[in-house]
Image (cartoon, rainbow, N blue to C red):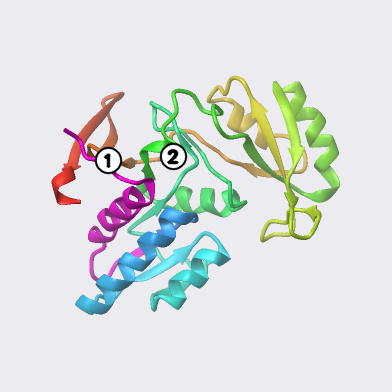
Amino acid sequence: MIKKVAMADLKQVVAEVIARRVQDGETIGIGSGSTVWLAIEKIAQRVAKENLKISCLAASHASAFAAERAGLNVLPLISERKLDWAFDGADEVDPQLNLIKGAWGAMLKEKILAQRSEKFVVIVSEDKLVKRLGKKFAVPVEVVPEAAFIVQEELAKLGAVDVRLRKDEKKGSPFNTEHNNFVLDAKFKNIEPSLEAQINALPGVLDNGIFINRASEVLIAKASGVYSLRRCAGQIKEELILSPDKF
């Protein structure tokens, strides 16, 4: 019988798994989100306990601050240092390991981080799994403010059934990214792989939260264990890497 595990505990488990992979002397990329921030804490504990020498590049100010506060050596994202690997969370993961990201508005730098990494590992709990992209989350699109209304119209032409300007509820004004741009959240009934590039081709768009074929591996924490999903010869291979009795 599989024991019931709270979602918060599953996030702790997959954060611990990613922290165990860090090796002395590495430079790693760190994404954004609640599961990533848990992993930062776990990595920092290993660094302090084992006196590891690692450096990291962060995809958001929040992650950079969390890493520095935890005692990690944080390099600016513009650094030319080669990344040994990178990890990040996701808002949705489909059966082909495609992703939707950007709930925190950092999808532009997260995609830069993924592009720079030969190995890009995504860590999620099982609630992030979907049968199709867009089932739960809209696609976040970062736009320069002057283009927001034009892009909103163009997204509708691409099939978006609902497009909303993201608001900062505390300030009562549009949400601003770290680059002082706006975010449009576009809901699609169907997301084809080509949509990522189609959105990015619109004038005024910086990038969007669709990540097609970016993940080298997805680590999923379920009540039945932590699973590694990878592409192998065109197929998705699933492997149990941590059984529930080890939680």
Q: Is residue 19 left or right of residue 153?
A: left
Q: Residues within 10 Å of mark 2 (few under 14, many from 20)?
A: some
Q: Residues within 10 Å of mark 1 (few under 14, many from 20)?
A: few
Work out which quarter of the rendered image holds the N terminus and state it.
Answer: top left
- Name the secondary structure under disc 1: loop
Residue positioned 15% across, 50% down in the render: 246
Q: Nearer the viewer, residue 95 or 117?
A: 95
- Tag 1: amino acid: Lys
- Would you say residue 18 sits in the magenta stretch? yes
Residue 163 occupies quadrant: top right
Q: Earlier in the sequence, mark 1 or mark 2?
A: 1
**C-alpha distance separating marks 1 and 2:** 32 Å
Q: Is residue 108 left or right of residue 166?
A: left
Residue positioned 41% across, 67% down in the render: 56
- Name the secondary structure under disc 2: loop
Give percent across and percent down for residue 58. 48, 63
- Would you say residue 194 sits in the magenta stretch? no
Residue range in magenta is: 1-28
Q: Is residue 185 left or right of residue 232?
A: right
In the picture of the structure, the residue carrying the numbered disc 1 is: 4
In the picture of the structure, the residue carrying the numbered disc 2 is: 214
Residue positioned 44% across, 48% down in the render: 89
Give percent across and percent down for residue 247. 20, 51
